[in-house]
Image (cartoon, coloured by chain):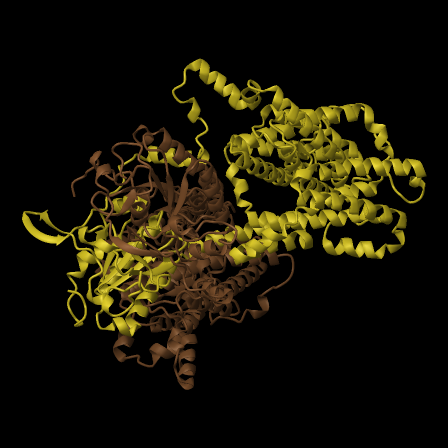
Chain colours: A brown, B yellow
Amino acid sequence: MEPRADDEGYKDNPVNFHHRHFMGEGMEITVPEVHMVVAPPPRTTFQKLKCRLKETFFPDDPLRQFKGQPCGRKFLLATQYIFPILQWGSHYKLGHFKSDIVSGLTIASLAIPQGISYAKLANLPPIVGLYSSFVPPLVYAVLGSSRDLAVGPVSIASLIMGSMLRQEVSPTKEPVLFLQLAFTSTFFAGLFQASLGFLRLGFIIDFLSKATLIGFMAGAAIIVSLQQLKSLLGIVHFTAQMGLVPVLTSVFHRTREWSWQTILMGCCFLGLLLSARHVSMRKPRLFWISAGAPLVSVILSTLFVCAFKAQGHGISVIGKLQEGLNPPSWSMLHFHGSYLGLVIKTGLITGIISLTEGIAVGRTFAALKNYQIDGNKEMMAIGLMNMVGSSTSCYVTTGSFSRSAVNHNAGAKTAVSNIVMSVTVMVTLLFLMPLFQYTPNVVLGAIIVTAVIGLIDIPAAHAIWKIDKFDFVVMLCAFLGVILISVQEGLAIAVGISIFKILLQITRPKTVMLGNVPGTDMYRNSQQYKDAVMVPGFLILSIESPINFANTTYLKERISRWMEDYEADDASKHSGLEFLMLELSAVSAIDTSGVSFLVDVRIALEKKNVQLVLVNPLGEVMEKLQKAEECHNLLRQDRLYLSVGEAVASLSSSIKPRHPMSVV
Amino acid sequence: MEPRADDEGYKDNPVNFHHRHFMGEGMEITVPEVHMVVAPPPRTTFQKLKCRLKETFFPDDPLRQFKGQPCGRKFLLATQYIFPILQWGSHYKLGHFKSDIVSGLTIASLAIPQGISYAKLANLPPIVGLYSSFVPPLVYAVLGSSRDLAVGPVSIASLIMGSMLRQEVSPTKEPVLFLQLAFTSTFFAGLFQASLGFLRLGFIIDFLSKATLIGFMAGAAIIVSLQQLKSLLGIVHFTAQMGLVPVLTSVFHRTREWSWQTILMGCCFLGLLLSARHVSMRKPRLFWISAGAPLVSVILSTLFVCAFKAQGHGISVIGKLQEGLNPPSWSMLHFHGSYLGLVIKTGLITGIISLTEGIAVGRTFAALKNYQIDGNKEMMAIGLMNMVGSSTSCYVTTGSFSRSAVNHNAGAKTAVSNIVMSVTVMVTLLFLMPLFQYTPNVVLGAIIVTAVIGLIDIPAAHAIWKIDKFDFVVMLCAFLGVILISVQEGLAIAVGISIFKILLQITRPKTVMLGNVPGTDMYRNSQQYKDAVMVPGFLILSIESPINFANTTYLKERISRWMEDYEADDASKHSGLEFLMLELSAVSAIDTSGVSFLVDVRIALEKKNVQLVLVNPLGEVMEKLQKAEECHNLLRQDRLYLSVGEAVASLSSSIKPRHPMSVV
C-alpha cells in the first residue's frame, strides 16, 4: 500500500484494460471492456406510487405475518395484533408472575409519590396524579406491546400542560375550569397520538433528533427544578412565569417568605434522595434503594409532621385528599367555547412530547431484550390510553423513562407489572388516602428534583460536541430556548434548526474531485485520499446528494468553479480538459430541474469543447434520464458508463496527445 | 455483456484476487489485496466552519479576481464590481450603440403600452407605469450586470401588489393612501431584495422550483386575464376579489352591463395582437411584429375613438394624464402606522416574485450568450433600483421575460438599450401624454391578455408530467392554489410541498441490495441490474442518503426487513447470513443519531452472529466515525473496506462452508 503520488502515475495507465472484441454496427473493433448502464425494469406509475406509499407508511411491513394464512388464523392474528395481551397472555407462566409482582410493587412505591408530585407540577389536585396511575396502566397492559414500559404521569408533559394552560386560566382562581381544560387537553393529546399511529405518521416524532431532545430535556429539568423552589424554600407567593430569569428574580425578591424549617427539611430529604440515587447508579444491583427512597421519604416526613405538629410551624402540607376511585369525567370534556384553541394546542404539544418519551423508552428496552416494537401500534395504544384516561379523571400519561428503568431492573417480564402497580394504586386510593394528609409539600419538591436531575445528560452532550458541532448548536438552542424563552418555543426553534440543516445539506451538496487510487481502478475523493492520481484530460466530479430545484443553481456555479480551478492548475495545463465526468453514484434522486441542469451543463460544456460523461446513474435517475431522452442527448452510448474506471479506460484512447507524458 | 444470472455465478468467484504479501504484526500471510480507508486530513473546527460558510454563501467565489492584485488595481476592480457600467462602458463601441438604439426603441414601443396597462392591473394611476419605465432602467444600466434584461413593471408583481393592498385599502375610495402604500411596499421589496443579495442569501429563491413557477405563472396568467374581463366586456361594477369563482360569478351576474361596442373593439384588437404574437412565434426573425403590435393597437384605437367620439358610446378611455417627469415620492413612504404589517408583507412577496423573474431572465440570456451573472450582485442591483424607484414615484419593477426576449431578438448588446428606452419614455412623459387621453381601456386589457398568455407553458407542463409525476403534482397545486385560493397561498402551498418532498426523501432514504455485475468486481443494485449475482453469506446494502435523526428509525426497520427477506429467501437459506455490508458511498453526511444508529446495528447484529462491515465511508462520515471510535468499535481494520469487491474478496475466505456450492 505504498503511496505513488509521483508523476509516474500518469505513465502507467491506472486502469485494467480488458480487451475484448466488440460487435458494433457491422464492424469489429477492439475496445476496452465496457459494461452497459441499464434502467431498472419498467413499472407503471401506479406500481411506483404503491411502492413509495408502502415505504413511507409501512416500512416495517406490519401485515407480513398475515400473508398466506387461512382465514381463521388471520382473524386470530388480527385480534392478537390489536390486543397484544392475547398473544403473551396465552403462554404466561407462574414464574413470570413472581417477577411481575416484585417489579409491580417496586414501581408502585415510586409511582405513588411521583404521581402526587407531578400532578402538583401540572397545577392539578394531587389526587389526579394517583387517578392517572390507576386507569392508564390497565389500558396499556391490554393494548401495549412493550414488556417494560411503566405507565403513568411524567414530569415534562406535566410541566408543559401546566404552564400552557396557566397562561390563560389561573389554577387557583378557577380550579374547576382548569381541571376541565386539563382533561380536554388530555383527550386531544390521546386523539392526536392515536391518529398519528393510525395514519402511520409516526415518523413525525423522528424529527425530534437526539440532540434536540437532550437539550430540551436538560432545559425542562432546570425549569421543573426552579418551580420546586416554591416548595423547597416554603415561598407562598410564587411567580406564575416559568423562565429562568423571572423565577430567580421572584425567589430573591421574596427572601422574607423563606421558611428555615422548610429549607432544613428540604435539604435533609433532598440529601437522602440524592444519595439513594447515587448509590443505585454506582451499583445497579441496588436499584431498589433509589426506587424505594421516595416512598420512605414520604412516610418519614409525614410521621415527622404528625409527631411534631410541624404544619403549624411553617411547613406546608398537602391537606385533605378525598378517598375513592376515579370518578368519571366525560362530562368535563369541553369541545367548544373560547378555550378550544388552547386545549387543542396544549393537547398537540403534550401529546407529541409524551409520545416521544413513551416510544423512545419502549424502543430502548425492546432493543435491550431483543424484541420488536411497532412504533405506530404503540402510538395507538398510548393514544387510546389517554383518551380513556381523559374520561376517567386522568391527565396525560405515557411510559416514564425512570420508572421503566426501575421496572426493568426489578425484573419485570410482562405488562402484568403494570397491572400490579395499578392494583396497588387502587388500594391506596380506596384506603390509604388519609395518610397523605400531613405529607409536607417540601418532600414532594425534593422527589421531583431528584427525578428530573437524571434528565440532564452531560456525557451525552459532551459526546455530541465531540462528534458533531452543528448538532451541539441544535442542542444548545433547545436548551437555551427552553430556559430563556419557553418550553414550546425552545423546542420549535431546535426542530426548525435541525430541518434547516437538512435543507442546507441539500441546497449546498458536496461535490468532490475524484482521483485514481494507485494500483486499482477505483476513483476516490482526492482530498481524502492524498495519493489518488488525477487522469490528464479528465475532470471527475462526484455529486453527493439528490439533484433538484434547490441545488441546481449552486451545482452549476460550483462546476464552473471546478473547471476554472482545473484550468488554472499548472500541472494539468499542458493537457487541456477533454472530459467532465459526473459520477452519479451518490445521486439518489433527480427531478425535472435536475434533468434540465444536466442538459444545460452539456450545452455549456459543448461550447467549450468539453464532453460531459455520466457515470453510474442509479435506478430512478436512469429512468428519468431515459424519459427525457427524446428531446435531449444525455444518454449517448459513449457518454454513459457503469464505472469511472471503465469510462476512463474507454475514453482516454480518444484524447489527443498534447503532452509528451500523457497517455495515448 | 451476456447476462449470467445462473447458479454458476456462485462458483467462479466474482472478485479479482490480487495476491500480495502483507506484513502484519511480525507475521507474513498471503491475503487478497486490500486498500485502506483513510480519513481526510484533519482540520480544525474553525477551518471547517470557514469552508462550510464559504460554500453556503460564496459558492461562486466572487472575490477570486481580487486575489494577488496590487492595491490600485484592487480598487479599480472593486469599483467595476459595484458599477459594472465602468467595466463594459470602457470598451463600448459605435457598432454596439447602433444595435442598442434599435433594440431600445423596440422595447420602448412595448414598454409604454405595457407600463400603462400593468399600472392599471396594480390598481395604480396609469402614469405610474410610465414613471416606473423611466427611472429604474437608468439605475439598472449603472448597477446591473445583465446585457439583455429589459427593466420595467411586470404583470405578476403588479397583480400581486394590487390584490394584496386592495384587501385592506380601496384604490378608488382612498387613492392617495393606496399610492402611498404601493410606494412603501416597493421600498420594502427593494430593501428585501438588496438584503438578500448583500447577505448572500440569494439561494432562497431557488426554493421556487421550475415546476412551482410553471404552475404559479399559468395560474397567475389566468387570474390576470380574468381581471381583464372588466375592460374587455366594459363592465362598470366589477368584483374586488381575484379568484376564478367570484370573478366568473360577478361577470355572469352583470350581463346587463356588458357593452357590445367594447366587446367588438376588444375582439378586434385581441385578434390583431394574438395574430401578431403567432406570426412572431412561428418566425422569430419577425419578432418586431409582436413587439410593435401593442403600440400600433394603442395608436389605432386612440385614433378611432377620437375620430368617432366613441367615448360617448360606451367605450371607456384612460382619461387625462398629467405631463412631466417623475415627482419625488420620498415623503409618501410610511414606515409606521397601522398598515406597516401589510406593506412589509406585500413588499416581501412582490419582492421575491419579481426577483425570481428578474434573476431567471438574467440567467437565461447569460447562458445563451455565454457570460456569467452573479445572482447575489444582480439582487442588490434590482433591490437598489426598487429602493430608488420607490422615492421617485415608481412601483415595483424587475427584468421582464417578454420584453427581455424582444430586447435580445432586436440585437441588444449592452444595458445602453435600457437607457435608450428610458429616454424614449422620458420624451413620452414630457410631450406625448395628452395623446393617450382617448386610448380605450379595452385595448389595454387586450395587451395584458396577450402578454400573459405566454406565461401558460403547456409543453413544459407536459414534459414535467412525463419525467416526474411528483413535480407535476407540485405544479398542479401551485396552479389550482393560485386560481382557487389566492396568489400568495397557492405559491406557499407549492413551496411547502416541494420542501416536504425533499424531507420525505431524507426521511425514507432508498436502501438497495447490491449484487456482483458478472465479469467485474463492481456491485450494483440487483433490481436495476437483473444479471447481478448475490454472494452467498453476504447481504450488501447501499444506503442512498445522509444518515441522520430523521431516518435512523426507518433505516433500522428497513435493514431488519432486508435481513428477514434474506433469511426467508430459499435460494440463500443454505448458507446463513454471515456479513451485513453497508455500502456508504452515497452517504454524504452523518450526525450523532447516525453514529448511534451504526453502533446499534452492530450490537443488534452481533446478537445474531452477523458481522457489520462498512464500505467506503466518505470524508465527513469517516471523520465522525473516527471521533466516535473511542467508545465504539465500528472501524475495526477487518470490518472497513474501500470497495465492496475488496471486502467480499477478503471476507469470503472466512465463511464456513455450509453449502457444497459456496466459495471457500
Q: Is residue B369 visible?
A: yes
Taking depth in this image into account, of B530 and A629 the one nearest to the observer is: A629
In-image side of A235 versus B571 (left or right): right
Image coordinates of residue A585 in percent, x first then y, are 36, 51
Taking depth in this image into account, of B384 and B435 the one nearest to the observer is: B435
Residue lying farthest top? B72
Task: Tell me which corner region of the image, top left, top right, bottom left or bottom right, holds residue A357.
Answer: bottom left
Placement of the N terminus of chain B among the 4 image quadrants: bottom left
Image coordinates of residue B345 in percent, x first then y, are 64, 40
In-image side of A519 versus B123 (left or right): left
Compared with A536, B12 (above or below) is below
- Name the residue located 78 percent from the left edge and 44 percent from the top edge: B272
Image coordinates of residue A499 in percent, x first then y, are 45, 48
- Name the residue located 81 percent from the left edge and 41 percent from the top edge: B443
Compared with A447, A654 (above or below) is above
Image coordinates of residue A422 in percent, x first then y, are 39, 71
Compared with B634, B309 (above or below) is above
In-image side of B195 versus B640 (left or right): right
How many numbered badges does the structure rendering display? 0
Q: Is residue A127 visible?
A: no
Task: Tell me which corner region of the image, top left, top right, bottom left or bottom right, holds residue B527.
Answer: bottom left
Taking depth in this image into account, of A567 and B642 the one nearest to the observer is: A567
Placement of the C terminus of chain B among the 4 image quadrants: bottom left
